Amino acid sequence: MYTVYSYLFDDAVYEEATKSYLVQPRVLHAPNQDTFLQDAVLTMSMNKSGTFTFTIPPDSQQAENIAVMRSFITVYTDKPKTTFLWAGRPICVETDLYGNRTYTVEGLLSILNDVYYLPSRFINYPIKLFMNRMMETLKWNKEFDFLIDQKEGLPQDEPGKTFVFPDYAPPDCVKLAVFQTAMTEDDISDSLLYVDQYTENGGNGTANVERTLTRWWNSCETIMDILQTRVIDYFGGFLEIDAVKSGALRDGFFRLRYLDPETEENRLNQTIEIRKNVLEISSTYTAEDFYTAFIPVGINENGEETILKNEEDAGTAATNCFWTYYYGGADGILYPGNYVLWRAYRVFNHNLYQKYGMICRKIEFPFEEDATYETKKNTVVDFAMKLKAPQATFTVKAIDLSMVESGVDCFRVGRQVQVICDSLGIHEWMTIEELSISLNDPTNCTVTLNGSLESISKLVAGR
């Protein structure tokens, strides 16, 4: 069962004890309280704000609980326990001839588009510190206020006239509309905070070090654009809004998180199983951004493109060319996994090159002029090691088993669910990229998953 709450800014009450504002929730949708929204559909996507649309009939008083751009809407599920799913702010309301009001609510991730960051340069910044600089700027800009000084020479003393110079300050409860000032390690997946530095030439194991980045931009860009193009596009993962706890809305209620869907903690105990809870299926294949090798380039201080070369390449088959990643087998022996070959100016992902041949692209790496060769090498090799085979998406209409079976995790965007088709020998973890839920028929969800091209081809052909 899904529950929807509204928080009106005008309901904000200042608490002296906590020195903060508090907003109590108003119930919009709660089947156990016989309170419903009509045609309520929630659509969530990875790294996108998502939308929530619903209709309020003319004979309902629910419209009093919603204010465009001056309220928040939250959605929770109670399966298998009370879980926060999504939050947004109303941006549009349309009224038809019969008085029905249809609302469109935009996800709170859009707040990252409210603030622009000035042209800046960050050199060897740990990723958590980099993201926290964005968060500090978001908070500062949201709470920004200033005074107009009544300087000498202004005509405030002119006889018969009074001039008022107001303070410019944001709304009292503006803190409710920003996320936490600092992201902690609990807000970022370890696989994104840290990076494996792959050992040269078949060495034993890898070294796990804190991930750092060097980034700059020469024009004003939104925080969302910066995080998408300077962080997510390089390291993967997804941003999501989470709520600290249910109940009254208060300062720090919402948190921004940066997560890796492929980690163990982001795997659901729910399944999508052909001939069990799948009602319809369709698919999309694309390999537009796929490559098996690339030419790493940088931009110098004159704006000129320079090719990054392997300075240790001796021109022989193996010497000083390979960075090999090893893993331990059940028998205690170390076996070679994937490796990267950097010959002259081209970098290859061995597994992909062996399977698909030469598909080469040019990739720009934003290195500082004084970046060491070791820094460049580790960054390029790590990028190559993480290249993936062509991905495909398939969309299913599926029954959310959490609504009909106890103890089952509900579908959540950015999490992985096991896709099963025993007749085709498929048992694969796939990431939920998009999820559309009809709150009036919660067992019927539209789920878009990202998986391997090979498995999805089999699923669609053998359905």
Image (tube, grey):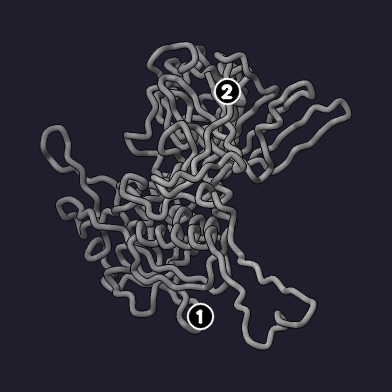
Which amino acid type is shown beneath numbered disc 1?
Glu
Q: Position of residue 180 (x, y in %)?
A: 42, 50
Q: Is residue 354 above or below residue 279?
A: below
The location of residue 287, given as percent across then percent down, is: 55, 46
Query: Can I make out residue 424 in this image?
Result: no
Q: Nearer the viewer, residue 376 or 136?
A: 136
Task: Please name which of the two marks, 2 or 1, marks the residue nearer to the observer.
Answer: 2
Q: Establish if 389 lies above or below 112.
A: above
Mark 2 residue element: strand
Residue 418 position within the rendered picture, expressed as x and y whole percent measured from the top left:
41, 25
10 Å crowding of disc 2: few (<14), some (14-19), many (20+)? many
Asked whether, in this view, residue 408 is left or right of residue 168, the answer is left
Q: Is residue 275 above or below residue 284?
A: above
Q: Residue furthest right?
A: 97
Asked if one can make out residue 328 in the rendered structure from this viewpoint, the answer is yes
Identify the residue at horizontal 62%, vertical 23% (top origin): 438
Q: Nearer the viewer, residue 286 or 95?
A: 95
Picture quadrant where residue 135 is located: bottom left
User: Is residue 241 found left or right of 90 in the rendered image?
Assistant: left
Q: Amino acid at mark 2?
A: Cys
- Name the residue carrying label 1: 304
Q: Residue at x 26, y 66 (%)?
A: 316
Q: Would you name the residue on which mark 2 appears? A: 445
Q: Secondary structure at mark 1?
A: loop
Q: Residue at x 41, y 58 (%)?
A: 131
Towards the viewer: 437 or 163: 163
Image quarter (top left, top right, bottom left or bottom right) of the C terminus: top right
Q: Is residue 346 left or right of residue 229?
A: left
Percent position of residue 91, x then y: 69, 43
The residue sitting at 33% across, 57% down in the picture is 382
Number of numbered discs on residues: 2
